[in-house]
Image (spheres, grey):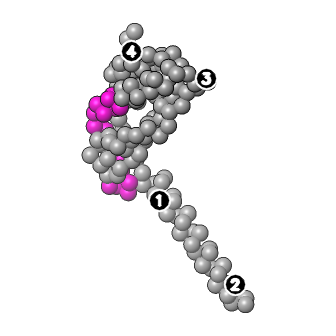
Amino acid sequence: MKKWLIILLSIFTLNSHSQIKYSEDAFIDGEEFPIFPGKPDSLKCFLESNFNYDILNVCGDKNIYVIRFRVDTTGTATDFGFVRSYPIGYKSSCFNANDSTMRSEILRVLKMMPKWEPGYLWGKKATVWFTIQIPTPYTEFQCQNKED
């Protein structure tokens, strides 16, 4: 009985160690995220300079759109999808009636993004998923270069 207990504990210990080591290599040491071209706020500036605010701000109800996309090994942003959209506070008919129009505008601008510098994993180009949030109405401009 003791022999089997020692064998089981040895196997458990070996498996735990290998999982921890793999996790460190995969997610800390070897990963470099893709970079949007330009300054640190370039992505925000790109979005803010290309949105049609007549469409995004048609409804005064506050909403957040959560969009997921990937940057592939060539630096191209693809596979856009809405993970979630939800109103903040009271849900009105204005949001529901204009939801597809606002989604179309967000996707139109995201699909215009220039190529990114691709990400790397263990020295090789890798595909990386991103998730961003777009609030509507869009009124809090964060781009330093935005001219009102």
Q: CA distance from mark 1 to mark 3?
A: 46 Å
Q: Secondary structure at mark 1?
A: helix
Crowding near the residue tagged with mark 4, few <14, some 14–19, many ≥20 C-alpha atoms within 10 Å: few
Q: Position of residue 87 (x, y in %)?
A: 55, 27
Q: Which mark is residue 54?
A: 4
Residue 130 as seen in the image, left or right of residue 115: right
The numbered mark at residue 25 is 1
Q: Quadrant of residue 51?
A: top left
| Cα distance between the residues tagged 2 and 4 | 69 Å
User: The N terminus lies in which quarter of the figure?
Assistant: bottom right
The amino acid type, in three-letter code, at marker 2 is: Leu
Q: Nearer the viewer, residue 43 or 98?
A: 98
- Residue positioned 61% across, 23% down in the render: 90
Mark 3 or 2: the one toward you: 3
Rounded to the nearest angstrom, the CA distance separating label 2 from label 1 is 31 Å
The amino acid type, in three-letter code, at marker 3 is: Tyr
Give the residue at mark 3: 90
Question: Magenta span has 115?
Answer: yes
